[in-house]
Image (cartoon, helix red, strand yellow):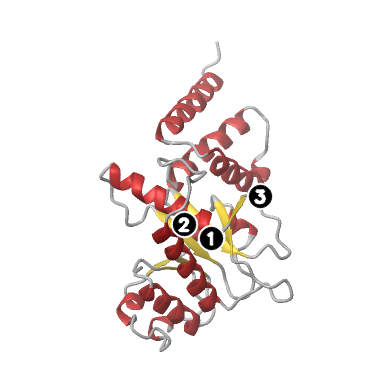
Amino acid sequence: MILVSPRNPLNIGAAARAMANFGLSDLVIVAPFAVNWTEAKSAVGAPDLLRQARVSATLAEAVCDCSLVIGTGSLDRRRPEQRVLTMGEAAAALRTALDGAKDREEDVTARVAVVFGSEKHGLTADDLTWCHAIAVIDTAPQQPSMNLGQAVAVALYELTRVADAGTGPTMFPTRMADSEQLERLAALVEETMEEANYLTRGQRSANGEALRILLRRLLPNDADLRRMMGLFRRILWRFHHPD
């Protein structure tokens, strides 16, 4: 589980406690505001989990080895370009990704992630470009936002409950390229676009976000990724070695 820029140490502690309640242990904190969050007294029954949490400077770093990343939030004042899932659909997708990795005898400890945003504004549009989908907790329209610690507890309950009960087939393939691989492909595509005068360097930031979303919509597997990398490398070679 990943918390992005959490502001209140008590919420971080509450999230750690909820993880312990539902048998999870891998917590990553991205750019926390407070320096004393490891001492949060709200992590009742989970002090070791909190102390062992990893810290990342950016969400990109936190999800680099993840093949499936599910963001969380409400749809209030948000029109995500990613697909929107129920918690049941998110649970099915996460379970399928983990089971597929186990079948291939791979390390599954960091292959998937569920991401929660800051208490102030939730996940930003840029945060969501690193996610394959956004999972929504149904709330009353009069008060769509939830406290971070409570949202983590509700989401983990729903995810583990649905996973234990079993659901139908997921819309995600079982073998997808991880985030670091997708970023290498995105960089190669952008370089090719620049060589073709399709975009300028000044456009790279906005184009990079659009490419991240596009590649996660395409859901390429390892073989797809190799083919696309080979294609764009060949195009670049032709630009650099014209007849």
Inter-mark Cα distance, 1 to 2 = 6 Å
In primary-sequence order, the first of circles 3 and 2 is 3
Seen from the viewer's position, the closer of residues 4 and 103 is 103
- Residue neighbourhood size for the residue with mark 1, other residues' Cα within 10 Å, grouped as few (<14), some (14–19), many (≥20): many
**Position of residue 126 measured from the top left corner of the image (x, y, whole percent):** 61, 57
Q: Is residue 12 above or below residue 240?
A: below
Q: Is residue 124 above or below residue 121?
A: above
Label placed on residue 91: 2
Label placed on residue 87: 1
- In the image, taking residue 167 as reference, residue 25 lies left or right, namely left
- Residue neighbourhood size for the residue with mark 3, other residues' Cα within 10 Å, grouped as few (<14), some (14–19), many (≥20): some
Instruction: Tell me which amino acid carries mark 2.
Output: Ala
For label 1, the SS is helix
Q: Quadrant of residue 112?
A: bottom left
**Position of residue 83 measured from the top left corner of the image (x, y, whole percent):** 61, 49
In primary-sequence order, the first of circles 3 and 1 is 3
Q: Quadrant of residue 201?
A: top right
Question: Which residue is under mark 3?
Answer: 81
Q: Is residue 126 above or below residue 25?
A: above
Q: Is residue 187 above or below residue 92?
A: above
The residue depicted at 48 percent of the width and 26 percent of the height is 233
For label 2, the SS is helix
Query: Is residue 15 visible from the viewing direction of this image?
Result: yes
Contact (Cβ within 8 Å) of mark 1 with mark 2:
yes
- In the image, taking residue 204 as reference, residue 12 lies left or right, namely left
Instruction: Tell me which amino acid carries mark 1.
Output: Met
Instruction: Tell me which amino acid carries mark 3.
Output: Glu
The residue depicted at 29 percent of the width and 47 percent of the height is 102
Camera-near label (3 vs 1) is 1
Seen from the viewer's position, the closer of residues 112 and 4 is 112
